């Protein structure tokens, strides 16, 4: 079993940034449930860093979209930014680096599946941005955001909007009916896992698994879109 120092080093190697003050990274990864359990050595949790990281992310993503889309009106830019930095999008980015496995959680939060919860991993993603900003300045924070949030944007937006895009794709080509069907539901109430299939006129075209029905439907729609894309080639 790797100790905490080894895990922090592994994460820094993974993100390509070495902290001058490693305590900032540890704080960014510390949930309040863990901090509250440390009676003797009270730790700071990630919430203040998340507040800062949220502002840095909004500024960097706004600048990126402003320059990348010179003809796009303000309202559309606002909607696009919102879809890029919303909770599911950031959780999707966090999964790319397996950020959840590095979070310090209290026993109760661990037992209720907090490590896999989108709301928690997206918060920590922002806290890490805040920590990098304090430790290395705006340019280092920007590098991290460009690499782990703004990269592969076409695919991420496709994933986030998959249900809408699938509906539009099907309406373009035929009058077939699309619906989602719950296949399976497992786990205790606090840690459910849903399996859903996307069906076109009763025929399965994609499957998805998620912690909520909505997340599972989104995954199923994304799989269906990829399948339709392959067929169209």
Image (cartoon, rainbow, N blue to C red):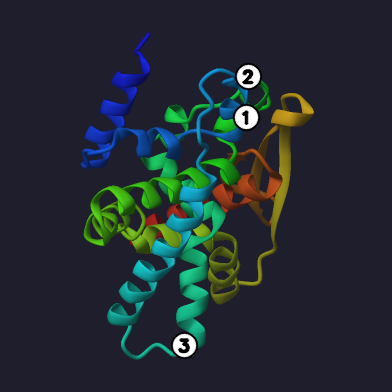
Q: Earlier in the sequence, mark 1 or mark 2?
A: 1
Cβ atoms at labels 3 and 2 below 8 Å apart: no
Q: Which of marks 1 and 3 is nearer the N terminus?
A: 1
CA distance separating discs 1 and 2: 8 Å
Q: How crowded is mark 2: few (under 14 residues within 10 Å), some or many (20 or more)?
A: few
CA distance separating discs 1 and 3: 40 Å
Residue 81 versus residue 162: which sits nearer the camera? 81
Cβ atoms at labels 1 and 2 below 8 Å apart: yes
- Relative placement, left or right, of 119 versus 18 is right
Which residue bears the numbered disc 3? 74
Residue visible at 73% across and 41% down in the picture: 182
Task: Using the rendered image of the protein, determine whether residue 207 is visible from the camera's viewpoint.
Answer: no
Nearer to us: label 1 or label 2: 1
Q: Earlier in the sequence, mark 3 or mark 2?
A: 3
Q: Which residue lies furthest to the front in this view?
A: 40
Which residue bears the numbered disc 1? 33
Q: Is residue 151 above or below residue 81?
A: above
Q: In this view, does 228 lie above or below 164?
A: above
Which residue bears the numbered disc 2? 107
Residue 224 is situated, as x and y percent measured from the top left of the image, at: 52, 53
Dividing the picture into quadrants, the one containing residue 94 is top left
């Amino acid at each position: 079993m790797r100790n905490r120092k080894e895990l922090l080093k592994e994460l820094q190697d993974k993100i390509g940034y070495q902290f001058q003050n490693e305590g900032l990274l540890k704080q960014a990864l510390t949930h309040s449930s863990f901090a509250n359990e440390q009676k003797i050595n009270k730790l700071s949790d990630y919430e203040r860093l998340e507040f800062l990281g949220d502002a840095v992310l909004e500024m960097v993503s706004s600048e990126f979209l402003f320059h990348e889309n010179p003809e796009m009106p303000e309202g559309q830019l606002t909607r696009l930014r919102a879809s890029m930095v919303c909770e599911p999008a950031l959780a999707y980015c966090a999964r790319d680096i397996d950020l959840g496995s590095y979070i310090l959680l209290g026993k109760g939060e661990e037992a209720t599946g907090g490590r896999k919860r989108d709301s928690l991993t997206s918060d920590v993603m922002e806290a890490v941005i805040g920590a990098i900003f304090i430790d290395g300045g705006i340019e280092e924070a920007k590098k991290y955001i460009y690499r782990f949030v703004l990269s592969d944007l076409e695919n991420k937006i496709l994933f986030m909007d998959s249900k809408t895009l699938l509906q539009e794709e099907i309406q373009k080509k035929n009058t077939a009916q699309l619906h989602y069907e719950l296949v399976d539901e497992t786990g205790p109430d606090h840690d459910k896992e849903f399996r859903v299939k996307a069906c076109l006129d009763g025929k399965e075209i994609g499957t998805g698994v998620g912690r909520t029905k909505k997340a599972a439907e989104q995954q199923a729609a994304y799989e269906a879109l990829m399948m339709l894309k392959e067929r169209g080639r």
